[in-house]
Each structure stands twice: as C-alpha cells, then as structure tokens.
Amino acid sequence: MKRENPANPDNIPAISRLTSRHCASLLALVAVSGAIGCTHTTPVAESQVENSVELRQESVASSLPSQSVPAPSFNASRAMQYVKELVAYGPRPLGSENHKKVERYILTHLQGDRVEQDDFEITAREGRFPVHNIVAKFPGSREGIIVIASHYDTNWPLRRSAYIGANDGASSSGLLLELANQLRGKRRDGYNVWLLWDDAEESMRLPWVDAESLYGVRHLAQKWQEDGTIKKIKAFILEDMIGDSDLNIDRDTSSTSWLADLVYEAATRVGYQSHFFARQLEVKDDHRPFLERAVPAVDLIDFNYGYNNVFWHTTQDTIDKLSPKSLAIVGTVTLETVKLLDLR
Ligand SMILES: [Zn+2]
C-alpha cells in the first residue's frame, strides 16, 4: 500500500519521503501551469477528527438496534500461530518457491470449503509472473456478499533480503485463516461472507508505482464486474498491517464513510474503540479497485508500524513486533462489523 498526503514529510521513512518529494515537484509544476494534479491535501486537525467521528457515530448508532450483543469469539493464539507459520516460509515474492508453498498452506487450511481460485499471469518489466487469488465462500441466508480481504505476497524488489512481511501481509492473512474457522460449518443468518487472500498487492518497484501494483485485486474486480458478482457485494473490508502490538488503526479518508462509521460502532460495542481512528490519512491499497466500481469499501490499516512507520518494508518487519491481542482486536471488530452489516 501507499500513503497519500503525509502529514509530516520530514519525519517519514525514506520510501515515502521519495514519493513525497516527487509529489512536491509535481505541485511546483502545477502551480506554474495553474492545473491541479496531485492529491496532497492538508491533514485534518485532531480535534476536528474526534468531533466529526463522534457526530457520525451518533447517526450510525441511531439506525441500529440498541441492545448490547455478546462479542464474537476469536481465537487469537491460533491466528498468531498461522502468522508464525506463514513467515516461517521466508520471503514470498511473486514467482518464488516460497510463494507457491504459502499458496498451498492457505489452500490446505481451506479443505472442504467452497474455494474459487483466480489464476492468471502478469507481464511486468521484470518478467512474467503467475498471480493467484484465493477466495473461500461461506454461504448465508441473505442475498448479498461481504468480502474480507488480505494480501499474502511480499515485495518483489526486496526478494533478496531477509524481508518476510510479518505484519505486512502475514498478520492479516493469518487473521483470515482464523476467520474461516469462525465461519466454517455454520449456516450464516445473514449475508454470504467471502474471504479473499489476494496476490501481487505490492509494487514491483519501490517507491510505489500505481500501474505496477494491486495486480490481484484489479484482476478480480474486473472479473467480478464482468460476471455480475460486483453488484452483489455489500461491503469490502480490507485488513492490512493489523498485527502491530501498538495497535492504532487509521481512518483512511478514501474509504466509504458509512462503512468506516460502522466499523467504529462495532469497535465501540466490543470495547476496542480506543484502537481505532485517532488519525486520518489517505491510503492507496487493495480496496481501491472496488471503490472505483462503487463497492462500499474500508481499509483497516495501522500505518504507523514502529515510530514513524520505521519497520514498514524493512527486514525489521518480524514476528516479535506483533501481538495476538492486536489480532484479537481486529478479528473481533471485523466479526462484529459483519454482524452489524447483517442487521442493516
Ligand atoms: Zn507492503
């Protein structure tokens, strides 16, 4: 993923700083020409953020049943075990043996489930690569689909380093495997829930290049548009970098606002709201191709991984920075959000 409109360009990691400098020079150009081209915006003051979230909160809460509901169960230690096993394969860039092993690992955990595999090839400057999206489908009684997604690849440009993406890719992929355990074997009294392990999220070049990233979801969104599936998707919930032991999920300003409000309502109902939405920023991530097709979508991401996000896309993105508690918080809030969507 890539962060837009950095609030403090002098204090962010090298990768983002490069992007920021590029954008700054773009801004200088458009200032001369009078055109508006770059997406840099002024960050919202924190007090304004809190007020606006609170106001939105009231309107969402008033449209839902007021009775308190028991928090859904989520087995955090089992989810953490999945994350450990995923990173134990080592770096899993496109085209690698480790990538194939991780695909098999995910599929092995979905034996007996209804699985759609979306396999195709991409041609990048770096060569041709197979890409594999994996979708596990859990049926519900209601017409309509809720998609919960996570990418599982690691960065191709970092393939020769010890970069294993424990938080960036593995944490959310392990969380989805545990969500599958929660959904399996029950007839849902609500929407169909589809879990999506998507591939080739990471950019083939760093800093991030839009046209050379998000390959998996761009392909799937197009496929689902062509076969009519996209019209049935009621919500697309993306999980990314959600394992940080110091968990602060950001509010992505490009996400659908009513759905982000519903996530906050869910977090409040299960008592985890202090981990959500203290900060606003815009993130380009796997939810984009769905937002562009008018699917309500939200990105649950903690884009402050270590002070000033220093562990992001580095070999320091390792399992010791993560906590099962964070997986429990995001897993529980996700299940509660699904419950609230079912009630709408
Ligand atoms: Zn990444």
Image (cartoon, rainbow, N blue to C red):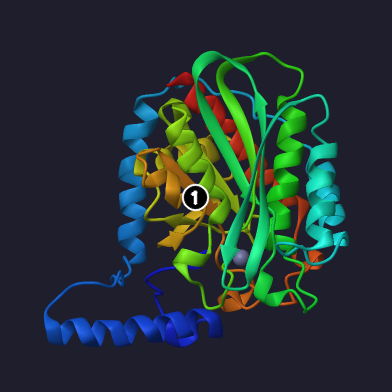
Farthest residue, direction left: 34
- Asked whether mark 1 lies closer than 8 Å to ligand 1, one says no
Q: Which residue is mark 1?
A: 218
Of 142 and 6, nearer the camera is: 142
Residue 77 visible, this angle = no
Place of residue 296 in the rendered image (x, y in percent of width and height, measured from the top left): 40, 38
**Is the residue 280 above or below the residue 82 in the image?**
below
**Is the residue 218 above or below the residue 312 in the image?**
above
Residue 159 is drawn in which quadrant?
bottom right
Decide if residue 10 is on the left or right side of residue 321.
left
Of 284 and 54, nearer the camera is: 284
Decide if residue 76 is on the left or right side of residue 304.
right
Place of residue 342 in the rendered image (x, y in percent of width and height, measured from the top left): 50, 21
Place of residue 192 in the rendered image (x, y in percent of width and height, measured from the top left): 57, 22
Q: Residue at x 19, y 72 (%)?
A: 36
**Is the residue 60 above or below the residue 184 in the image?**
below
Q: Residue at x 43, y 56 (%)?
A: 252
Amino acid identity at mark 1:
Arg
Residue 4 is drawn in which quadrant?
bottom left
The total number of labels drawn is 1
Q: Residue at x 71, y 48 (%)?
A: 173
Of 239 and 246, nearer the camera is: 239
Decide if residue 138 is on the left or right side of residue 68.
right
Q: Residue at x 78, y 48 (%)?
A: 103
Decide if residue 109 is on the left or right side of residue 233.
right
Element marked by disc 1? helix
**Is the residue 157 above or below the residue 152 in the image?**
below
Residue 26 is drawn in which quadrant?
bottom left
Residue 303 visible, this angle = yes
- Pointer 1: residues within 10 angstroms few (<14), some, or many (20+)? some
